[in-house]
Image (cartoon, rainbow, N blue to C red):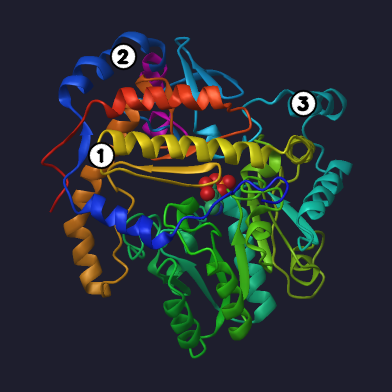
Amino acid sequence: MSENCGISRWDDPNEINARLKKLTSQPIWEVDDEYYNGEIMPYYDEKCKASKAVYEEAKNYIPGGVQHNLAFNKPFPMCMDRAEGAYLYDKDGNKYIDFLQAGGPTILGSNYEPVRKRVEALLEECGPVTGLLHESELMLAKEINKHMPNVEMFRMLGSGTEACMASLRIARIATGKKRIIKMGGAYHGWSDQLVYGLKIPGSRGLLESHGIPGSDYRTTDECRPNDLNMLEALLKRNRLKGGTAAVMVEPVGPESGTRPIARDYNKHVRELCDKYGALLIFDEVVTGFRVGISGAQGYFDVVPDLTIFGKIIAGGYPAAGGVGGKKEYAQLMAAGLATGKHRAYVGGTLAANPLSCVAGTAAIQEIAAQNACEKAGKMGDRLTDGLKELIDKYGLPFVAYNQGSICHLECTGAMSFDFSSMSFIKSALGILKNKDMMYVRKDSMERMGAAYMANGIVTLAGSRLYTSMADTPEIIDEALNRFENVFKHVKKTDKGLV
Ligand SMILES: Cc1ncc(COP(=O)(O)O)c(C=O)c1O
């Protein structure tokens, strides 16, 4: 393993998919009612009163009572007061081991002091924003380029969503072609063109597409994850339909590796892009500076034309997003007054504010200096290995796997549905028929998430866990004890099959 690489092993995707298929072809296994009603619910009723009070009031002022999709915890969102390293503390003072890590950005651990100090110094001097050039913008672009040399230029934006939108514009201008191919189930933010096949492959524009005109998807194609034959067939077909401007991938697999891919998949995607004259866009919003200091592109040794950044790029501080790549492409986002040439118009009043740039530069420097990716990756391996042992010990059908510090624990297979092999009509019918089952499984996944939380473990929606440099073997082992407390109470139900 090279220095500061966070992935020490790569599982066979066929094996994981076979286990996931087995999981979804049997009824749901979940914590039994006696434990859930007798111990889990009382935890929330008795020990989380302050969180509940905030949530109840927030429902009057905030749609759904919470601002962030990841905070929709069952039975109600926990209100967090304090974050430190590997731990979170809620408003009632309860302490949790934090495997959400803000959805990925805090690989150094939450509220990492050396980064915070740099931000505080900046605030003292200049405040968060001036709207004019600040040297920290240059520092951040240079820091990224140091670790990912093919990101010759970097344009900072406000979020990963914006960065994905911008990359599509660049690809169309650069190639003069129209269509975009994304992978089924991949998440590239919530912009109109990319809420397509979101989370569930083959769901096309059906599940989460309300409020988006169908015409917005007209030039988006969805390819089955890890299927190179289908990708080539789409690229070939698209030659007669305006051509493919770009193939966009999450390089460890759609939805942060929830749908695993073969180790050499990205290399072949690169070859196909070259063959058909499409740009290759790596969405490294999660993987950049997490799976390795040189990102997934370093780990796979593949050079994308454009790289999307988010999350870690501002060290967990706000306004985190950007696009980088070869000069010829990145130049197309040049700021300033119109040049008369075709260019991708991007902007954002607070994009690249000094606060975000200082935080991002400091975070990347610390990630490099502390070898954070490798440390977090080792803890991801330890956590996943421990979960696998527990799954075997209790004879559960659950599936655990990881890509370094990105760990997956599928208890119900709610995210494993796939409609992509169906025809469009069949798919629409299949979705209607299976949607209910999917939601039953999702509900059960959240019930497991509630049980983990009541045992002092914060997960991403009960099925994903991010480790950080702040995790130690002792913290991981303590977390595994808590997972065991939950797994002990898991029983097979008669729910979850059509
Ligand atoms: C792979 C990927 N791309 C894009 C995004 C969107 O980023 P943002 O939430 O900053 O808009 C996310 C967010 O989780 C992501 O995981």
Residue type at mark 1?
A: Leu
Residue type at mark 2?
A: Tyr
Dot 3 or dot 2: first in sequence order is 2
Q: Are marks 3 and 1 in contact (CB under 8 Å)?
A: no
Callout 2: CB less than 8 Å from ligand 1: no
Dot 2 or dot 1: first in sequence order is 2
What SS does tag 3 mark? helix
Q: Are marks 2 and 1 in contact (CB under 8 Å)?
A: no
Q: Nearer the viewer, residue 288 or 405?
A: 405
Label 2 and label 1: CA atoms lie apart by 25 Å
Label 3 and label 2: CA atoms lie apart by 35 Å
| Other-residue count near label 3 (Cα within 10 Å), few / some / many at <14 / 14–19 / ≥20 | few
Dot 3 or dot 1: first in sequence order is 3
What SS does tag 1 mark? loop
- Label 1: which residue? 396
- Label 3: which residue? 114
The circle drawn on residue 43 is 2
The circle drawn on residue 56 is none
Q: Let me know if residue 64 is in the magenta part.
A: yes
Q: Nearer the viewer, mark 3 or mark 1?
A: 1
Q: In this orientation, does residue 395 appear? A: yes
Label 3 and label 1: CA atoms lie apart by 42 Å
Left or right: 380 in relation to 411: right
Q: Residue at 55% x, 33% y: name it.
A: 101
